[in-house]
Image: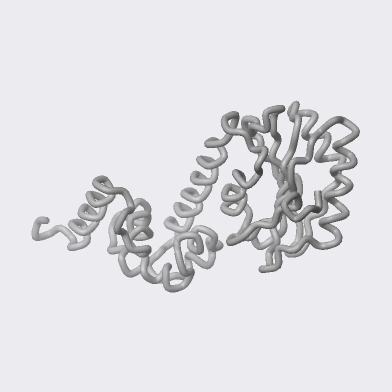
Amino acid sequence: MTEDEPHYHGHRQRIRERFLKSGLAGFADYEVVELLLTLAIPRSDVKQPAKALIARFGDLRGILDAPIEELRAVSGIGTVAPVALQIIKAAATLYLRQGVEGRDSLADPIRLTEFWRMRIGALPNEVFEVAYLDSGYCLLRDGVDRLEEGTTDRATVYPRRVVEAALKRGAAAVVLAHNHTNANLSPSEHDKVLTRAIVLAAETVNLKVVDHLIVSAEDTFSFRKAGLL
């Protein structure tokens, strides 16, 4: 480090070298966040902002799930880094989706659980999504679609839309998923009625409903495992 070089430049180089040598093994949570922040904040020390993010949101998942406005409220974060963190989350979600497209069978839909928890589990409003599968229960390319987005406690979905979208994509089976914005993942009566209606509509065109998952950021409820499908 030269005399005129800011002290944090050497620190940034050291944590990057640690990552290149052994990945994230041995990194504290705030150091992982710090490493990410170095990509978006080039000209200031990011250790304290990283610690402040952990203190406020708990862990990396909490940070990536946080609204941009709340991230920007943390001292030292600025306006660009929150957008960068959202891009990182979106890229990770895309990575998970592409990892299962056209490859492994998803007859056990738990394979999509982590994907949906990251994608919709922490959203402030309910959304309803569908995964479209081929006859071998492999996810079709670009095979996840958000059909509806609603309020904090309901997203209205019409069974005909699910069936029409599946037929348009040439799907043989679907997995349904929506999020609950509170900690209670138990299906509401509306959830049960909607699922039965979609199953009945799907049966008329020989479309298989593999499961309906309700997700939050931390947990998942499966209609099939609960004997409701």
Give the vertical position of 100 relative to 147 (above or below).
above
Q: Nearer the viewer, residue 53 or 189?
A: 189
Give the vertical position of 63 relative to 177 (above or below).
below
> Within the image, what quadrant is residue 201 found in?
top right
- Residue 50 rendering spot, x and y as whole percentages: 37, 65
Say which residue appears at 46% left-offset and 69% top-offset.
Answer: 58
- Residue 39 rendering spot, x and y as whole percentages: 35, 51
Q: Nearer the viewer, residue 224 or 147?
A: 224
> Within the image, what quadrant is residue 3 found in?
bottom left
Give the vertical position of 119 relative to 6 (above or below).
above
Say which residue appears at 47% left-offset and 58% top-offset.
Answer: 82
Question: Quick check: 38 left or right of 99?
Answer: left
Q: How many numbered marks does the figure carry?
A: 0
Give the vertical position of 205 relative to 42 (above or below).
above
Question: Quick check: 151 left or right of 36?
Answer: right
Q: Nearer the viewer, residue 215 or 148?
A: 215
Say which residue appears at 49% left-offset and 48% top-offset.
Answer: 87
Say which residue appears at 77% left-offset and 33% top-offset.
Answer: 166
